[in-house]
Amino acid sequence: MRARRQYLRKKGEATYRLVRYADDFVILVKGTREQAEAIKEEIAAFLREHLRMELSMEKTSVTHVSEGFDFLGHRVQTRRVNGKETIYPSA
């Protein structure tokens, strides 16, 4: 997987990670806002066409991780530790 992500980044394409718990999920995209919006639309289309499900518009958004977001009762945001930016949940 790591080699695939490196290959996609070299081509200028977005990479992503899915975090899921029960029926809640968040997708972390490393790419532009436009790439993140496109991935959101692809996921919405897949859910609609293959699973007959819809994304909840009030719970679905594209935001930069530096702004933080709520997931499963935690606030997720970035923190700089030892000069490296890392994503952390907080209660």
Image: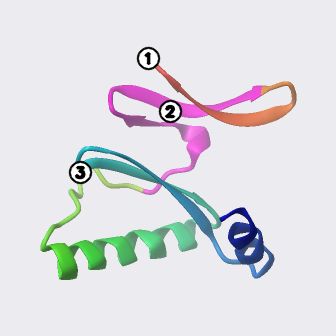
Residue 74 to residue 43: above or below: above
- In-front residue for pair 1/7: 1
- C-alpha gap between disc 2 and disc 3: 18 Å
- In-front residue for pair 7/37: 7
The percent position of residue 16, horizontal first and vertical second, equals 56, 62
Residue 79 to residue 18: above or below: above
The percent position of residue 90, horizontal first and vertical second, equals 50, 21
In the picture, measured across the screen, residue 18 lies left or right of residue 44, that is right
Q: Secondary structure at mark 2?
A: strand
User: Earlier along the polypeptide chain: callout 1 or callout 3?
Assistant: 3
Residue 68 is a magenta residue: yes
- In-front residue for pair 76/22: 22
In the picture, measured across the screen, residue 76 lies left or right of residue 83, that is left
Label 1: few (<14), some (14–19) or many (≥20) C-alpha neighbours in 10 Å: few
Image quadrant of residue 6? bottom right
User: Earlier along the polypeptide chain: callout 2 or callout 1?
Assistant: 2
Image quadrant of residue 32? bottom right
Q: What residue lies at 50% left-to-right and 33% top-to-bottom?
A: 76
Q: Which mark is residue 76?
A: 2
User: Earlier along the polypeptide chain: callout 2 or callout 3?
Assistant: 3
Q: Nearer the viewer, mark 2 or mark 3?
A: 2
Query: In this picture, which residue range is highlighted in magenta?
Result: 62-80
Q: What residue lies at 38% left-to-right and 78% top-to-bottom?
A: 42
The percent position of residue 46, horizontal first and vertical second, equals 29, 77
Give the residue at the far top of this rendering: 91
